[in-house]
Image: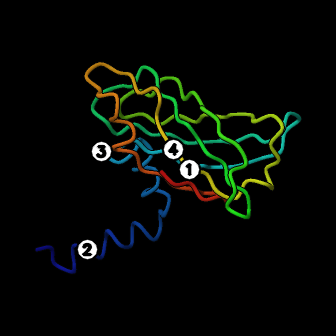
Amino acid sequence: MMKFDRLLPLALFAAVYPGTAALAQDAGTPGNLTVEINDLASSDKGCKLTFVAGNGLPQSLSKVSFEFVLFDEKGLVERMAVLDFRDLPAGKTKVRQFDLSGTKCEAVKSLLINDAPVCDGEGVAKDACMKVLKTGSRSSVELKG
C-alpha cells in the first residue's frame, strides 16, 4: 500500500499539470477503441463534426467506419450516416472531420454509434470495434455507443 507521503507529490504534479492525464489517454485506454465528439461547427454545406478517435488495441485498424444516428431535441432521429474513419494505427490518436450537408448543428442534440459496419485489421474480429468501444464528448452534444 502506498504511503501518503508518496501520493502527495503525485497529487501536486496533477494539480500543477492538469493536462497530463488527458494526454496520457490520447491513444485510447489500453484494450479499447475510443471515439469522442470534440466539436460541431456550422459550415457552408451544413454541420461539420470533429471527432477524436484513439486506438488502444494491440492491432492496427486498416479501415473502420461507424454508423451514426443523430437525434434532435425531441429525441427523434434527425438522420443516419455511415462515417469512414479510415485507418487507426495501434496506440495512436487521430482527428477526423465530417461535413454533413443539409444538417444544422443546432438540430443535433445527441449522437449514437449504432454499429461499426467496417472493422478491418490483421487479427481483428469483425465485431471487435463495437465490443471495445468507449465514447465521450467534449461538446454540448452527448455521444453514446
Please name the residue that numbered disc 4 is placed on: 114
Considering every residue shown, the one lying at the far bottom of the view is 4
Q: Nearer the viewer, mark 4 or mark 2?
A: 4
Please name the residue that numbered disc 3 is placed on: 30
Disc on the earlier residue, 2 or 1: 2
Q: Secondary structure at mark 3?
A: loop
Query: For the point 57% across and 27% down, which residue is it?
Result: 84
The picture places residue 80, in percent across and down from the top left corner, at 65, 40
Checking the image for residue 20, the label placed there is: none
Q: Disc 4 and disc 2: Cα gap in Å? A: 41 Å
Disc on the earlier residue, 3 or 1: 3
Image-based side of 105 in relation to 125, left or right: right
Quadrant of the image containing the N terminus: bottom left
Please name the residue that numbered disc 1 is placed on: 112
- The image quadrant that residue 71 belongs to is bottom right
Contact, mark 4 vs mark 1 (Cβ under 8 Å)? yes
Q: Amino acid at mark 4?
A: Asn
Q: Disc 4 and disc 3: Cα gap in Å? A: 23 Å
Q: Amino acid at mark 1?
A: Leu
Q: Is residue 50 above or below residue 87?
A: below
Disc on the earlier residue, 4 or 2: 2
